[in-house]
């Protein structure tokens, strides 16, 4: 019996949708190394957990 593999990463398009921002903006943030991601085989991948932590940091910084 095969175990189902659960993805923990998002493509750039999926990450943009997850964050509610444009593809262009997430592309710029990734290229400028301003958002956590990994480049694998020429593609940027984003871990959901890292994106959640990134949002938390941005929220905390906005009220300080």
Image (cartoon, rainbow, N blue to C red):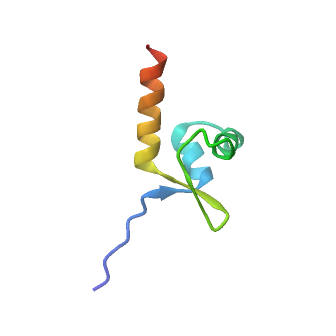
Q: In this view, does 18 lie above or below 45?
A: above
The residue under the point 64% across, 61% down is 43
The residue under the point 34% across, 73% down is 4
Badge count: 0
Between 63 and 24, the residue placed more toward the observer is 63
The x, y position of residue 63, in whole percent, is: 44, 14
The residue under the point 64% across, 68% down is 41
The x, y position of residue 21, in whole percent, is: 61, 36
Q: Is residue 19 above or below residue 10?
A: above
Quarter assignment of residue 16:
top right
Between 15 and 36, the residue placed more toward the observer is 36
Residue furthest top as drawn: 64
Residue furthest front as drawn: 33
Quarter assignment of residue 39:
bottom right
Residue furthest left as drawn: 1
The residue under the point 48% across, 18% down is 62
Q: Quadrant of the C terminus?
A: top left
The x, y position of residue 60, in whole percent, is: 41, 22
Q: Quadrant of the N terminus?
A: bottom left
Q: Is residue 15 left or right of residue 56?
A: right
The x, y position of residue 34, in whole percent, is: 60, 38
Q: Is residue 11 above or below residue 41?
A: above
């Amino acid at each position: 019996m095969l175990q189902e593999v659960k993805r923990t990463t998002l493509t750039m398009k999926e990450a943009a949708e997850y964050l509610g921002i444009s593809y262009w903006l997430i592309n710029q943030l990734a290229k400028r190394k301003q958002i956590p991601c990994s480049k694998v085989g020429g593609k940027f991948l984003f871990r959901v957990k890292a994106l959640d932590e990134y949002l938390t940091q941005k929220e905390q910084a906005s009220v300080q």
